[in-house]
Image (tube, helix red, strand yellow):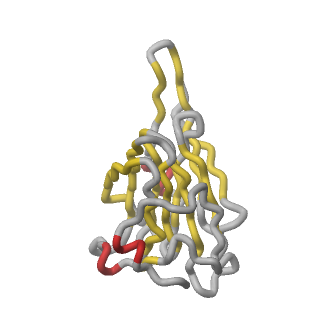
Amino acid sequence: MSFGFELLESKKVSGVYAVTPSIATDERGDIWTSFLKDDLEALLPNGLAFKHDKFSQSHHNVLRGIHGDSKSWKLVTCVFGEITQVVVDLRKGSPTYLNWQSYKINKAQQKMVLIPPGCGNAYYVSSELAVYHYKLAYDGDYIDAAEQFSVRWDDPSIGIDWPVTEPVLSGRDLKAPFV
């Protein structure tokens, strides 16, 4: 059984990768690898390493984001349920500035998304419940919510085609500025 990955760089947002694992399935269910240090850390600059994992559980119709920071690489996925994952290029001076890419992630379309610093991360939960996983790589200390940037989920200058018009949002996301 192979535990490799298929890597596909986004054509809309430079530096973003969809990482699709090989999945082995039999009568018991399936198994897939979410992380192989040598394979996935090769995508990071200057020998940076993943050093922090987080999980988030969200209910149906929740939209989290658009959030990001200037130094964290994020490898994200949905390990239970179904989400629409969105990445927005918020790096001024980038050739893909304000472009966005979306990915449907669920059991049938399992993938991870590698998000570089300066890009906004957001996701919408279309199942009754979803469990989201972040794997983070950064230099120094972790930048938490107070030091991160936020952008309005429905900013018309970005124009994300969300599958929802009235999501459940946090106070942070309700107050997020437009670009």
Residue situated in front as seen by the camera: 159 or 92:
159
| 166 over 94 or under it: above or below | above
- The residue depicted at 38 percent of the width and 48 percent of the height is 59
- The residue depicted at 48 percent of the width and 33 percent of the height is 32
Q: Is 99 displayed left or right of 81 in the figure?
A: right
Q: Position of residue 150 (x, y in %)?
A: 44, 77
Q: Position of residue 87 (x, y in %)?
A: 56, 65
Residue farthest along the left direction in this orientation: 141
Q: Is 58 displayed left or right of 153 in the figure?
A: left
Among the 4 quarters of the image, the one containing residue 21: top right
Q: Position of residue 144 (x, y in %)?
A: 30, 72
- The residue depicted at 30 percent of the width and 75 percent of the height is 140
Q: Is 125 displayed left or right of 54 in the figure?
A: right
Q: Position of residue 11 (x, y in %)?
A: 72, 63
Q: How many marks?
A: 0
Q: Is residue 165 visible?
A: yes
Among the 4 quarters of the image, the one containing residue 159: bottom right
Q: Is residue 45 visible?
A: no
In what quadrant of the picture does the C terminus appear?
bottom right
Q: Is 15 displayed left or right of 152 in the figure?
A: right
Residue situated in front as seen by the camera: 150 or 28:
150
- The residue depicted at 41 percent of the width and 70 percent of the height is 72
